[in-house]
Image (cartoon, rainbow, N blue to C red):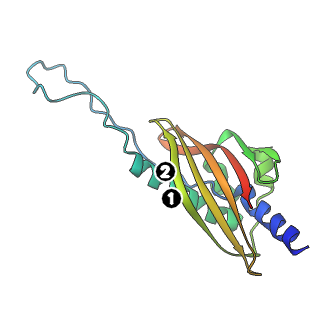
Amino acid sequence: MKSILAFGVLTAVLTFCNLSEKLRQASQSEPASSNSSAPANRTASKPALDKDVLKNSLLKIENDLTEAAMNGDITMIAKNTTDDFELTGADGKVQNKNQALQDVKREKNIRGWAITDAELVSASETEAVLRYVLNVTLKTGQSGRAKVTDSFVKQNGNWLIQSEQQTLIK
C-alpha cells in the first residue's frame, strides 16, 4: 500500500515538475560589413553553439520549474511552456498544457528532490532536447526516480518546453 502511495505522489510531482523559468539568451549575430576594406578575418557568421553553456542554462530552467511545480506556481510554468505543450506522465497519461496545469498542486509530502545524470541529447540555435533523472524523496523516507526527456524550442529569445516524457525507473 505504501508503494502505491509513493507511486501516486511521485506521479503527481512529476506531472509538472521540471518546467522552467525563462532563459533570456539573446541570439546576436554581427551584421556583415559592406565595406570592402574590412579586415579579411572578420566574418558575419554566428558564433558556434556552446553546448555546455546551453546545457547549464536548460538545467537552471529545469531546477527553477521543478521548484515552481513543488510550490504549485502554475503561472511560472504556464509562461515557460509553449501553447502546444504536451506532457506524457510517468503513468502514461498524455495531457495538453491546460490539463497538465490543472494537476499542479503545492506538494506537502516531498522532503527533497534532485536532478542528476543530465545529458544534452541534441541542440541547435532554436531547438534542444535535455534528458535527466529526477530523484524524489518523500517525508516518509520513501523515494522514487524517473527518467525525464524535455524538448525545448526557442521563441522570442526564450527557451520554452514544448514536450515532456517521464518514465519511472524501477
Amino acid at dot 2: Leu
Q: Is residue 41 left or right of residue 156?
A: left
Q: Specify which label sits upstream in the sequence, 2 or 1.
A: 2
Task: Residue 118: give x, y in percent of width and height.
Answer: 53, 56
**Mark 2 vs 1: CB contact within 8 A:** yes
Task: Residue 128: give x, y in percent of width and height.
Answer: 52, 41
Q: Determine the residue located farthest toward the left in the rendered image.
A: 37
The residue that disc 1 covers is 60
Q: Is residue 159 left or right of residue 90?
A: left
Task: Residue 85: give x, y in percent of width and height.
Answer: 69, 41
Residue at image position (69%, 67%) is 70
Classify the position of the N terminus by image quarter.
Answer: bottom right
Residue at image position (67%, 50%) is 78
In the rendered structure, find residue 70 and report the number of the disc placed on it: none
Classify the position of the C terminus by image quarter.
Answer: bottom right
Report crowding for label 2: few under 14, some 14 to 19, many 20 or more residues within 10 A (C-alpha).
some
Which of labels 2 and 1 is toward the front?
1
Against 137, residue 105 (above or below) is above
User: Where is residue 141, by image quadrant?
Assistant: bottom right
Q: Is residue 66 left or right of residue 51?
A: right
Distance CA(mark 2)–CA(mark 1): 9 Å
In the rendered structure, find residue 23 and report the number of the disc placed on it: 2
Q: For this rendering, which residue is in front, 64 or 127? A: 127
* Secondary structure type for disc 1: helix
Residue at image position (66%, 55%) is 147
* Secondary structure type for disc 2: loop
Amino acid at dot 1: Lys
